[in-house]
Image (cartoon, rainbow, N blue to C red):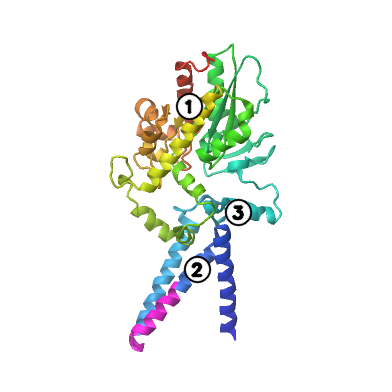
Amino acid sequence: MKKRLFYTGLTIVSILHIYMLYKYGISTFVGTCLLYFFLYKLCTFISDGIFRENQNKIIRHNIKSIFIILIILEFLLLFIFKPLNSWSENEVFIYLSEYKRKEIQSLVNKIGFKQARFTYTDFYQPKSSQQIKREEFNITHQYNKLGLRGFLPSVQKSTNEYRIIVLGDSYAEGVGAKESETLPVQLQKQLSASFPNKKISVINAGINGSNPIYEINSHNRILSKHKADLVILLVFPNDLPDIDIMQNNGVLPIGEYAFALSHIYRSIYLNSSKYENLELEDSITSNKWIKLMDYLNIEIQRFRNSLHEAGQQLILVYIPSKGELEGNPIPNTYPKTLPKYLKPEINLADSFSLKYIHRDSLSVYYWEKDEHFNTKGYKLAAEIIARHVISKHYVGTH
């Protein structure tokens, strides 16, 4: 009777967990334990069919010991060491798949949190705030009436105003920096100092975790009414995986199930990736990623052309990861290939490496663990962009 109740409860929990993972991309350590339990049962079933009883006792004992060790290792990787945790696992020890971002937002709304939004397309909740807490900093972001960080000028420009919109992800929004220290604010300060007779307005349209496709669409749907003279689009190496996720339209790839359930699988998968095969000159570069880069390049060129038709200009800026400058790119990114494809007006990887930063001083410009720019990093990036804007006479010729 107890055994029947145990397996009935186990079946209910398993079905619930499978449903939550399939429908919403949500997984917990309970799912990891269930996975190993069923793998253990499968191994013992196979063992029972192959080995004699006296041999099988030893085999079963060894199998049990192996799976206990694996569970302990999974526990340590998730709760103690955390080297491969997602952002949500670091905060609440629950895996939330990026492939199911829309579905998760819908679930949060259903259970009563009506302010939850799909920020990539709808921005943050207007006139709200969000605490960004990391080991190295704790900063509250304030959002304006449009749901963006920082000051928002009126839709109608003043006569002497030169307006800039900065599109991008967390580097544009300014994760790791106070409002007065973000890249858009620093850029506005520097250009205002160089053009005292002009009113320089820089709108921060950065959304943490976004990608250029979402950002371009958001500009065209929402921000185009602000009639920027210049749009600056920041591109970061992990934009390609983000676009790949976006194109899956909420469907979990098979590998995502294993990724959600097992840190050991994540370690094996990431360590087996061959980053040396990701460059353009390599004949075995994945066609999938080349297609993604082609797609991104086409969309950016289309955006550039539409802006030019409206008398506006675009500057494409490539933002390097800390790992890229260290010669150790973060997983699933294509740091050298992407600039070759996109040909940005400003490649901060070159500017940082050749002119400003030595490898032993990266910590001056990046947070050591979080790896976003710190205050000095955002300021340096703004200086480089400002110099380009000034040297190309963007403001003076308008």
Residue interval drawn in magenta: 39-55
**Type of the residue with mark 1:** Ile
Magenta includes 203?
A: no
Which residue is found at the position 53% from the left and 18% from the top? 191
Q: Secondary structure at mark 3?
A: helix
- Residue receiving disc 3: 104
Q: Nearer the viewer, residue 341 or 200?
A: 341
Position of the N terminus, as image quadrant, is bottom right
Image position of 23 with respect to 238: above or below: below
Q: Farthest top residue?
A: 197
Q: Main secondary structure of the magenta part?
A: helix
Q: Secondary structure at mark 1?
A: strand
Give the distance between the C-alpha atoms of the residues marked 2 and 3, in whole angstroms. 23 Å
Query: Could you tell me if residue 88 is visible in this image?
Result: yes
Query: Could you tell me if residue 174 is visible in this image?
Result: no
Give the distance between the C-alpha atoms of the residues marked 1 and 2, in whole angstroms. 49 Å
**Type of the residue with mark 3:** Ile
> Disc 1 or 3, which lies upstream in sequence?
3
Q: Nearer the viewer, residue 89 or 316?
A: 316
Position of the C terminus, as image quadrant, is top right
Which residue is found at the position 41% from the left and 38% from the top? 322
Q: Are marks 1 and 2 in contact (CB under 8 Å)?
A: no
- Residue receiving disc 2: 33
Give the distance between the C-alpha atoms of the residues marked 1 and 3, in whole angstroms. 34 Å
Which tag is nearer the camera, tag 1 or tag 3?
Answer: 1
Which residue is found at the position 67% from the left and 26% from the top? 155
- Residue receiving disc 1: 315
